Amino acid sequence: MNEGGDKMVTNVGSASAVRSKTRGSKGRKKKGPFLKVKSGSAMVPIYRTETKGRVRYMLSFYRDERRMRKVFTSLDCAKREALFVAQRIQVGMQHVTDLKPHERDSFKAAVAMLDKTGIPLVAAVEDYIRARDLAGTESLAAMASEYGRHFKKVVQRVSIPEVVAEMLLHREQDGASKVYMGQLKTTLNRFALRFPGEILDTTSQEIDAWLRSLDVAPGTRNSMLRCIKVFFSFARSRNYLPEERNTAADSVRLVKNVSDDVTIFTPAQMEVILHAAPPRLVPILAIGAFSGIRVAELNRLDWSAVNLERRIIEIRAGQAKTASRRVVPITDNLAAWLEPLKRTGKVVSAKNMHVDVSALARALKIEWPRNVLRHSFISYRIADVKSADQVALEAGNSPSIIFKHYRELTTEAQAEKWFSIMPKEGQWQNTFTWDRRNKRITLNGKVIEN
């Protein structure tokens, strides 16, 4: 029997049999090994004994300066064990012979199965134990099958910074507005800095904890979460996340924004502000109050989109918050406010005009709540036309939001007064300046400390 260059020598049916032929002191032959098994220069003898018709095969060898014996009922088993012992003696690893034959067979079979994968036996056992601990009583095969069903379409494992860079590039190529791109970059670059690892490893608990740690206003936090939800949806569309499962961001809920309460001007307050306004501030006040255009949309609006003949204002897709075009009607009183103005270039020609508008309201002892002009328009408009769907189209919002937040805040009579506010006599001679350094307002020649 030859295996890996090692030799097994027997004296059964072999011309090269080796048998001990020493004689005892009384002239009779001393019984020698039944056969000898060699590996290199190491040799292990096998002795055959028979007692009451039962045959036994015994190995005799030395380990740690002690004589060791092992008995087998099968010659084949004895041969395999003798060869193994001889091989270990040859390489100086006698201690390994502690393994029983069936244990050694299992060891060899496990190593053979792992040869195809290139995974060491110890690493495979460690991985199995970890998986077994995680699985509990569940079947590992069933869990692996379920994992494969959900993750088979994931093309590769990518990091969050890599997906952020890819998404921003795609949005720019798709023509997203500069304002929207700025919001995405600010939020997602900050998100990628906090989570530089693989997107598959990010959990909803981690996202929620991070947003809570930022100590920002509820509205800001919700805005950031919406960007993150869009980001995870993009990653799923690129097969970086399982298609049939919710993303980590989907499980994170928006927070209640207590500042969502709608505050509006009364028709009398709006009339006071408009009648005191100089010509350069009229576009912001009149368009905001009587068309409900958002501040960000108004900042991007050009006079070429204001058509008094057709009585419409066109909000182009690149200007709208929702990235979709819409047309806002020009009411009769809004036309009266816009007609005398010089309508070229940008409607809002300087950023400080919004600051001047709020300063004008303060000079008139009127508080200026956030988004008050848009809130006022929607509230009076739905009272006037009595259709949430129509107002939603004009304002670029959803009918459910219009119905939930703005319905029944005003009456039809109040709405009639709102859309009847017209320029007064001498309106276009109004003057207004604000000395920010000294906090001094001059309104129609009258100095007002602010």
Image (spheres, grey):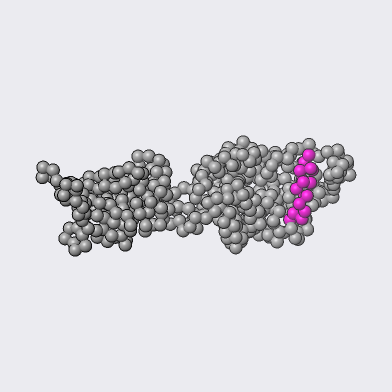
Residue 55, x across and y down, in percent = 15, 47
Q: In this view, does 334 lie to the left or right of 446?
A: left
Image point 75% across, 60% down: which residue?
345
- The secondary structure making up most of the magenta span is helix
Q: Identify the image quadrant of the C terminus.
A: top right
**Looking at the image, how many numbered discs can be counted on the residues?**
0
Which residue is more in the foreground, 323 or 176? 176
Residue drawn 72% across the image and 45% down it: 421
Compared to residue 133, the image places residue 329 above or below, namely: below
Inspect this view and state whether residue 421 appears: yes
Q: Which residue is drawn at 26% across and 55% down?
A: 37
Whether residue 332 is visible:
no
* Residue with the most extreme front position: 26
Is residue 447 a member of the stretch shown in magenta?
no
Residue at x-position 84% and y-position 44%? 436
Which of the 4 image quadrants contains residue 134? top left
Classify the position of the N terminus by image quarter. bottom left
**Residues in magenta?**
347-362
In the image, 159 versus 54, the foreground residue is: 54
**Residue 418, image x, y percentages:** 69, 43
Of the pair 282 and 119, the residue shown nearer to us: 119
Q: Is residue 352 one of those drawn in magenta?
A: yes
Most extreme residue toward the left is 53
Relative side of 94 to 356, left or right: left
Residue 244 lies left or right of residue 262; in this view the side is left
Question: Front-most of 47 and 329?
Answer: 47
Q: Position of residue 302 (x, y in %)?
A: 71, 59
Measuring from the top left, give residue 289's x and y in whole percent.
69, 46
